[in-house]
Image (cartoon, rainbow, N blue to C red):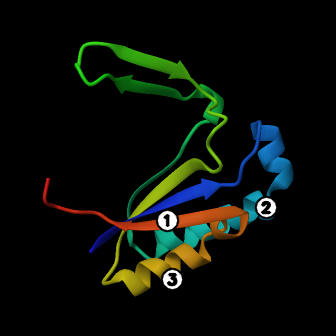
Amino acid sequence: MKYMLLMNAGPANSAEEAEAQAVCEFSDWMKFDEQIQGAGVVVSSHALADMTTATRVRVTADGERVITTDGPFAEAREVLGGYYVIDVPDLDAALDWAARCPGARDGSIVVRPVTDEY
């Protein structure tokens, strides 16, 4: 079954501040990536660019007016920094990979099943 591991970093005002707050070293991330890629469970993965490059789009109820806001978004407490989609036998295996991820120490990992219904 496929699961998405959403890696959320703690609040920071900039990439430099986030790096200064990080508990894990870059080598921790590289080691984890080698392990999870080597296990053959990764379907896809990406890190996201700095939050300051984000743009939010909303459409009003009438469907005609588009509201666009450039990031960063101060109201966000955690910032989505990247993801892995993995294919593992069950939720326990997905939770095990999430617990091994360095992002679990610097922030949190949200594990969500990927549905095939859409």
Query: How many numbered discs?
Result: 3
Q: Earlier in the sequence, mark 2 or mark 3?
A: 2
Residue at disc 3, secondary structure:
helix
Quadrant (top left, top right, bottom left, bottom right) of the N terminus: bottom left
Residue 53 x %, y %: 59, 27
Residue 5 x %, y %: 46, 64
Amino acid type at mark 3: Asp
In the displayed structure, 78 sits above or below 17; it is below
Which disc number belongs to residue 94?
none
| Residue with the mark numbered 1 | 110
Amino acid type at mark 2: Glu
Q: Earlier in the sequence, mark 1 or mark 2?
A: 2
Q: Residues within 10 Å of mark 3 (few under 14, many from 20)?
A: few
The residue lying at 30 percent from left, 83 percent from top is 89
In the displayed structure, 59 sits above or below 2; it is above
The residue lying at 60 percent from left, 27 percent from top is 71
Residue 94 image-quadrant placement: bottom left
Q: Residues within 10 Å of mark 1 (few under 14, many from 20)?
A: some
Locate residue 84 relative to residue 31 in the image: left or right: left
Residue 4 image-quadrant placement: bottom left
- Residue found at the far left of this picture: 117
Locate residue 107 relative to residue 93 in the image: left or right: right
Residue 54 x %, y %: 55, 29
Residue 16 x %, y %: 82, 39
In the displayed structure, 8 sits above or below 62; it is below
Residue at disc 1, secondary structure:
strand
| Residue with the mark numbered 3 | 96
Which disc number belongs to residue 25?
2
Q: CA distance from mark 1 to mark 2?
A: 21 Å
Q: Residues within 10 Å of mark 2 (few under 14, many from 20)?
A: few
